[in-house]
Image (cartoon, rainbow, N blue to C red):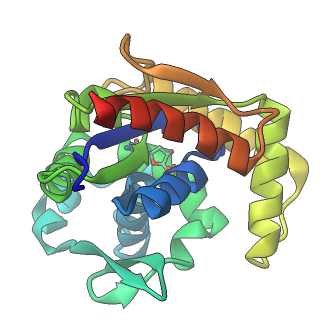
Amino acid sequence: MNQRKITIAIDGFSACGKSTLAKDLAKRLNYVFIDSGAMYRAAALYCLNHQLIQNGVLEKEAINAQLKQMAIHFEVIDQELHIFLNGSDVSDAIRQPEVAGIVSIVAAYKPIREKLVEAQQKMGEKGGIVMDGRDIGSVVFPNAELKLFVTADPEIRVQRRLAEMKAKGILMNRDEVRENLAERDHLDSTREESPLIQVADALVLDNSHLSKEEQLEWVLQKVALLVAN
Ligand code: DC
Protein backbone atom coordinates (compact mmCIF):
# COMPACT_ATOMS: atom_id res chain seq x y z
CA MET A 1 0.00 0.00 0.00
CA ASN A 2 1.22 3.50 -0.80
CA GLN A 3 1.46 5.38 2.48
CA ARG A 4 0.75 9.08 2.71
CA LYS A 5 3.97 11.10 2.63
CA ILE A 6 4.07 13.82 5.22
CA THR A 7 6.35 16.80 5.89
CA ILE A 8 8.60 16.62 8.93
CA ALA A 9 10.08 19.84 10.33
CA ILE A 10 12.93 19.58 12.83
CA ASP A 11 14.21 22.63 14.69
CA GLY A 12 16.52 23.20 17.61
CA PHE A 13 19.79 24.69 18.82
CA SER A 14 23.18 23.99 17.22
CA ALA A 15 24.70 20.53 17.65
CA CYS A 16 21.59 18.86 19.06
CA GLY A 17 21.79 16.04 16.56
CA LYS A 18 19.01 17.40 14.35
CA SER A 19 20.70 16.52 11.09
CA THR A 20 21.56 13.01 12.27
CA LEU A 21 17.93 12.44 13.22
CA ALA A 22 16.63 13.98 10.00
CA LYS A 23 18.99 11.86 7.90
CA ASP A 24 18.08 8.64 9.74
CA LEU A 25 14.36 9.37 9.46
CA ALA A 26 14.55 10.14 5.75
CA LYS A 27 16.42 6.90 5.14
CA ARG A 28 13.90 4.77 7.03
CA LEU A 29 10.88 6.48 5.47
CA ASN A 30 12.38 6.84 2.02
CA TYR A 31 11.89 10.61 2.18
CA VAL A 32 14.10 13.44 0.94
CA PHE A 33 16.46 14.85 3.60
CA ILE A 34 17.47 18.51 3.51
CA ASP A 35 19.92 20.08 5.95
CA SER A 36 18.88 23.73 5.69
CA GLY A 37 21.80 24.80 7.91
CA ALA A 38 24.13 23.61 5.14
CA MET A 39 22.48 26.16 2.84
CA TYR A 40 23.16 29.02 5.28
CA ARG A 41 26.72 27.73 5.65
CA ALA A 42 27.13 27.72 1.85
CA ALA A 43 25.80 31.30 1.75
CA ALA A 44 28.34 32.22 4.46
CA LEU A 45 31.11 30.60 2.43
CA TYR A 46 29.98 32.61 -0.60
CA CYS A 47 30.26 35.79 1.48
CA LEU A 48 33.75 34.81 2.65
CA ASN A 49 34.93 33.94 -0.86
CA HIS A 50 33.64 37.22 -2.29
CA GLN A 51 34.75 39.47 0.58
CA LEU A 52 31.14 40.27 1.39
CA ILE A 53 31.80 40.22 5.12
CA GLN A 54 34.51 42.32 6.75
CA ASN A 55 35.25 42.04 10.47
CA GLY A 56 31.87 40.44 11.10
CA VAL A 57 29.98 43.16 9.20
CA LEU A 58 28.02 42.32 6.04
CA GLU A 59 28.52 44.37 2.88
CA LYS A 60 24.78 44.51 2.36
CA GLU A 61 24.67 46.46 -0.90
CA ALA A 62 27.21 44.20 -2.53
CA ILE A 63 25.33 41.12 -1.28
CA ASN A 64 22.06 42.43 -2.69
CA ALA A 65 23.73 43.04 -6.04
CA GLN A 66 25.28 39.56 -6.15
CA LEU A 67 22.56 37.44 -4.58
CA LYS A 68 21.20 36.24 -7.92
CA GLN A 69 24.62 34.81 -8.77
CA MET A 70 24.79 32.68 -5.64
CA ALA A 71 23.59 29.23 -6.70
CA ILE A 72 23.17 26.53 -4.08
CA HIS A 73 21.92 23.03 -4.79
CA PHE A 74 22.04 19.53 -3.32
CA GLU A 75 22.99 16.21 -4.91
CA VAL A 76 22.91 12.75 -3.40
CA ILE A 77 26.25 11.04 -4.04
CA ASP A 78 26.83 7.52 -2.70
CA GLN A 79 23.73 7.92 -0.53
CA GLU A 80 25.15 11.05 1.11
CA LEU A 81 23.75 14.55 0.71
CA HIS A 82 26.29 16.88 -0.88
CA ILE A 83 25.90 20.62 -1.19
CA PHE A 84 27.13 22.60 -4.18
CA LEU A 85 27.91 26.29 -4.37
CA ASN A 86 28.09 27.62 -7.93
CA GLY A 87 28.95 24.16 -9.22
CA SER A 88 31.59 23.21 -6.62
CA ASP A 89 31.03 20.57 -3.96
CA VAL A 90 31.49 22.52 -0.71
CA SER A 91 30.24 19.83 1.69
CA ASP A 92 33.53 19.80 3.58
CA ALA A 93 34.40 23.48 3.21
CA ILE A 94 31.18 24.61 4.93
CA ARG A 95 32.16 22.74 8.11
CA GLN A 96 35.36 24.75 8.61
CA PRO A 97 35.57 26.95 11.73
CA GLU A 98 35.86 30.09 9.55
CA VAL A 99 32.36 29.41 8.24
CA ALA A 100 30.94 28.43 11.65
CA GLY A 101 32.32 31.70 13.01
CA ILE A 102 30.24 33.93 10.71
CA VAL A 103 27.26 31.83 9.62
CA SER A 104 24.84 33.23 12.20
CA ILE A 105 25.55 36.76 10.99
CA VAL A 106 24.89 35.76 7.39
CA ALA A 107 21.76 33.78 8.37
CA ALA A 108 20.30 36.83 10.10
CA TYR A 109 20.20 38.83 6.86
CA LYS A 110 16.66 38.97 5.44
CA PRO A 111 17.40 38.88 1.67
CA ILE A 112 19.53 35.76 2.17
CA ARG A 113 16.80 34.09 4.24
CA GLU A 114 14.14 34.96 1.67
CA LYS A 115 16.15 33.39 -1.13
CA LEU A 116 16.91 30.21 0.81
CA VAL A 117 13.41 29.81 2.26
CA GLU A 118 11.94 30.03 -1.23
CA ALA A 119 14.27 27.25 -2.40
CA GLN A 120 13.44 25.14 0.67
CA GLN A 121 9.70 25.48 0.15
CA LYS A 122 10.12 24.42 -3.46
CA MET A 123 12.01 21.29 -2.41
CA GLY A 124 9.18 20.40 -0.03
CA GLU A 125 6.27 21.06 -2.38
CA LYS A 126 5.37 17.40 -2.75
CA GLY A 127 5.80 16.32 0.89
CA GLY A 128 7.88 13.27 1.75
CA ILE A 129 10.60 15.51 3.15
CA VAL A 130 12.50 15.82 6.42
CA MET A 131 14.14 19.23 6.84
CA ASP A 132 16.11 20.41 9.82
CA GLY A 133 17.03 23.95 10.80
CA ARG A 134 15.85 26.81 13.00
CA ASP A 135 12.71 28.13 11.30
CA ILE A 136 11.36 25.05 9.56
CA GLY A 137 8.23 24.59 11.69
CA SER A 138 7.66 28.33 12.09
CA VAL A 139 8.38 29.76 8.62
CA VAL A 140 9.38 27.22 5.96
CA PHE A 141 6.69 24.59 6.57
CA PRO A 142 4.17 26.06 9.03
CA ASN A 143 1.70 23.37 7.94
CA ALA A 144 4.08 20.43 8.46
CA GLU A 145 2.23 17.41 9.83
CA LEU A 146 5.03 16.68 12.29
CA LYS A 147 7.14 19.34 14.00
CA LEU A 148 9.94 18.47 16.38
CA PHE A 149 11.94 20.73 18.65
CA VAL A 150 15.15 18.96 19.57
CA THR A 151 17.15 19.88 22.66
CA ALA A 152 20.12 18.44 24.51
CA ASP A 153 22.23 19.35 27.51
CA PRO A 154 24.78 22.06 26.51
CA GLU A 155 27.85 20.06 27.60
CA ILE A 156 26.65 17.01 25.70
CA ARG A 157 26.27 19.19 22.63
CA VAL A 158 29.84 20.47 23.02
CA GLN A 159 31.05 16.89 23.29
CA ARG A 160 29.12 15.82 20.18
CA ARG A 161 30.37 18.76 18.12
CA LEU A 162 33.98 18.06 19.17
CA ALA A 163 33.62 14.43 18.13
CA GLU A 164 32.02 15.43 14.81
CA MET A 165 34.87 17.85 14.05
CA LYS A 166 37.49 15.31 15.07
CA ALA A 167 35.96 12.74 12.73
CA LYS A 168 36.39 15.29 9.94
CA GLY A 169 40.02 15.83 10.92
CA ILE A 170 39.39 19.29 12.39
CA LEU A 171 40.85 19.58 15.88
CA MET A 172 39.21 22.22 18.02
CA ASN A 173 39.59 23.29 21.57
CA ARG A 174 36.64 22.52 23.90
CA ASP A 175 36.32 26.13 25.09
CA GLU A 176 36.33 27.39 21.50
CA VAL A 177 33.51 25.01 20.56
CA ARG A 178 31.52 25.91 23.69
CA GLU A 179 31.88 29.60 22.92
CA ASN A 180 30.93 29.20 19.27
CA LEU A 181 27.81 27.20 20.11
CA ALA A 182 26.71 29.64 22.83
CA GLU A 183 27.25 32.60 20.55
CA ARG A 184 25.36 31.02 17.66
CA ASP A 185 22.46 29.95 19.89
CA HIS A 186 22.21 33.49 21.19
CA LEU A 187 22.31 35.08 17.72
CA ASP A 188 19.93 32.50 16.22
CA SER A 189 17.30 32.89 18.91
CA THR A 190 17.45 36.68 19.38
CA ARG A 191 17.67 37.85 15.76
CA GLU A 192 14.84 39.84 14.25
CA GLU A 193 14.37 37.66 11.17
CA SER A 194 12.79 34.24 11.85
CA PRO A 195 14.47 33.58 15.19
CA LEU A 196 14.69 30.05 16.50
CA ILE A 197 11.50 29.48 18.49
CA GLN A 198 9.69 26.46 19.80
CA VAL A 199 6.32 26.62 18.06
CA ALA A 200 3.23 25.65 20.05
CA ASP A 201 2.50 22.56 17.96
CA ALA A 202 6.03 21.10 18.10
CA LEU A 203 6.85 17.95 20.05
CA VAL A 204 9.90 18.43 22.26
CA LEU A 205 12.59 15.80 22.03
CA ASP A 206 15.40 16.01 24.60
CA ASN A 207 17.94 13.53 23.29
CA SER A 208 20.66 14.13 25.93
CA HIS A 209 20.43 10.56 27.11
CA LEU A 210 19.01 8.84 24.05
CA SER A 211 21.01 6.88 21.52
CA LYS A 212 20.64 7.58 17.83
CA GLU A 213 18.48 4.47 17.52
CA GLU A 214 16.28 5.33 20.50
CA GLN A 215 15.47 8.81 19.23
CA LEU A 216 14.76 7.44 15.77
CA GLU A 217 12.31 4.84 17.13
CA TRP A 218 10.58 7.50 19.24
CA VAL A 219 9.96 9.67 16.18
CA LEU A 220 9.03 6.75 13.90
CA GLN A 221 6.22 5.88 16.33
CA LYS A 222 4.84 9.41 16.00
CA VAL A 223 5.07 9.20 12.21
CA ALA A 224 3.29 5.83 12.17
CA LEU A 225 0.39 7.32 14.12
CA LEU A 226 0.18 10.28 11.75
CA VAL A 227 0.25 8.37 8.48
CA ALA A 228 -2.30 5.84 9.82
CA ASN A 229 -4.83 8.63 10.36
O1 DC B 1 22.44 23.68 11.70
P1 DC B 1 23.75 24.40 11.47
O2 DC B 1 24.55 24.59 12.72
O3 DC B 1 24.55 23.81 10.36
O4 DC B 1 23.30 25.85 11.00
C1 DC B 1 24.22 26.82 10.63
C2 DC B 1 23.67 28.21 10.95
O5 DC B 1 22.61 28.54 10.07
C3 DC B 1 23.16 28.42 12.36
O6 DC B 1 23.90 29.44 13.02
C4 DC B 1 21.75 28.88 12.22
C5 DC B 1 21.51 29.10 10.77
N1 DC B 1 20.28 28.48 10.31
C6 DC B 1 19.16 29.27 10.23
O7 DC B 1 19.21 30.44 10.58
N2 DC B 1 18.01 28.75 9.74
C7 DC B 1 17.94 27.48 9.37
N3 DC B 1 16.79 27.00 8.89
C8 DC B 1 19.07 26.64 9.49
C9 DC B 1 20.23 27.17 9.98
Q: Position of residue 5 (x, y in %)?
A: 24, 48
Which residue corresponds to the image point at 19% horizontal and 28% vertical from the top-left?
A: 143
**Toward the viewer: 32 or 133?**
32
Residue farthest along the front direction in this orientation: 1
**Where does the N terminus fall, quadrant-wise?**
bottom left
Q: Is residue 202 above or below residue 33?
A: above
Q: In which quadrant of the rendered view does residue 85 lie? A: bottom left
Give the camera-side residue of 182 and 123: 123
Q: Residue 47: horizontal and vertical position, in percent?
A: 36, 66
Q: Image height check: is 3 above or below 178?
A: below
Please provide percent x and percent y for residue 125. Answer: 12, 51
For the point 77% across and 45% down, which residue is it? 211
Residue at figure coordinates x 43%, y 43% from the top left: 133
Q: Is residue 45 left or right of residue 158?
A: left
Q: Is residue 64 left or right of residue 225?
A: left
Residue 56 visible in this rendered orientation of the protein? no
Q: Residue at x 13, y 53 (%)?
A: 126
Pick out the residue farthest to the right.
174
